[in-house]
């Protein structure tokens, strides 16, 4: 917001959204990033339809601008209608979001890899970087009582992330909340302002 020195632009994590954001960062038009939804990394890793390519989550670090990153929706891989899901995944857990969007739950092994990938990319940042991790689910349907709630998978992400991250370079905070909770959003904003302060 203008009162803290930033004008807000929103990019949807739809593959093209992530690509557009990274492109504008590379062009020098973005001065800071709050990257809440990194689900495109899951699609790139597993083979979903919303990948933003292998360079996703690298532009801000290369540009040296402040970036706050969260594992938003890393519990899911995106596909079209249920009929379009590759046969090799037929035994996996799905959530049919609507007739044209099918979400597949990521496994502990996939989450481990995603934690490593995210931390490795943040470790290369040339500017201030932070990660804020929710402990009560990385999406609404990963919250306790919902279909994608899988504490072992989320723990696999966190454990791999913490093992890989360089905490001397990257500020890491964990919040005992779901990623959609107001308290989590407030912590993400506060953390971003903390690392972007002159």
Image (cartoon, rainbow, N blue to C red):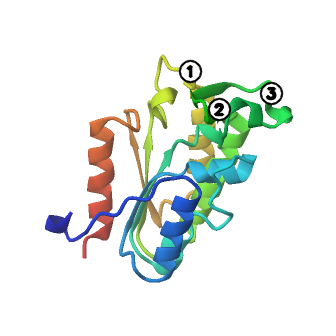
Task: Quadrant for residue 128, please give it.
Answer: bottom left
Tell which residue pokes out farthest to the front in this image: 99
In the image, is 197 to the left or to the right of 69?
Answer: left
Could you tell me if the residues under marks 1 and 2 are in contact, i.e. CB atoms within 8 Å? yes
Which comes before the other along the chain, label 3 or label 1? 3
The residue wearing badge 2 is: 105
Q: Position of residue 32 (x, y in %)?
A: 37, 70
Residue 180's spot in the image, x, y percent?
A: 37, 37
Q: Is residue 27 above or below residue 143?
A: below
SS state under label 1? loop
Q: Quadrant of residue 35?
A: bottom left
Q: Nearer the viewer, residue 18 or 61?
A: 18
Q: In this orientation, does residue 125 appear?
A: no
Residue 156 at x, y percent in the picture: 63, 37
Given this view, does label 3 or label 2 mark the residue nearer the observer?
Answer: 3
Residue placed under numbered mark 1 in the picture? 147
Q: Residue at x 38, y 70 (%)?
A: 66
Q: Is residue 18 visible?
A: yes
User: Observer-nearest residue: 26 or 113?
Assistant: 26
Residue drawn at (51%, 79%) of the image: 26
Residue at the (43%, 83%) spot, across then down: 28
Toward the bottom, the furthest residue is 28
Task: Compare residues 175 and 34 and report the one nearer the observer.
Answer: 34
- Position of 109 compared to 188: left or right? right
Whole-percent x, y for residue 192 in the image: 32, 60
What residue is pinned by disc 3?
A: 90
Quarter of the picture holding the C terminus: bottom left
Gap between marks 1 and 2 measured at Cα = 9 Å
């Amino acid at each position: 917001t203008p009162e803290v020195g930033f004008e807000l632009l929103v990019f949807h994590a739809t593959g093209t959204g992530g690509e557009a954001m990274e492109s504008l960062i590379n062009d020098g038009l973005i001065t800071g990033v709050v990257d809440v939804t990194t689900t495109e990394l899951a699609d790139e890793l597993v083979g979903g339809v919303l990948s933003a390519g292998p360079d996703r989550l690298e532009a801000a670090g290369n540009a040296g601008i402040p970036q706050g990153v969260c594992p938003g929706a890393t519990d899911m891989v995106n596909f079209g209608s249920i009929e379009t899901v590759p046969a090799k995944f037929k035994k996996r857990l799905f959530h049919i979001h609507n007739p044209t969007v099918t979400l597949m739950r990521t496994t502990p092994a996939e989450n481990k890899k995603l934690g490593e990938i995210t931390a490795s990319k943040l470790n290369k940042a040339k500017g201030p970087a932070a990660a804020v991790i929710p402990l009560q689910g990385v999406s609404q349907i990963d919250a306790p009582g919902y279909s994608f709630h899988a504490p072992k998978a989320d723990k696999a992400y966190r454990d791999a992330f913490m093992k890989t991250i360089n905490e001397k370079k990257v500020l890491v905070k964990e919040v005992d909340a779901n990623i959609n909770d107001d308290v989590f959003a407030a912590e993400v904003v506060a953390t971003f302002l903390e690392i972007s302060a002159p």
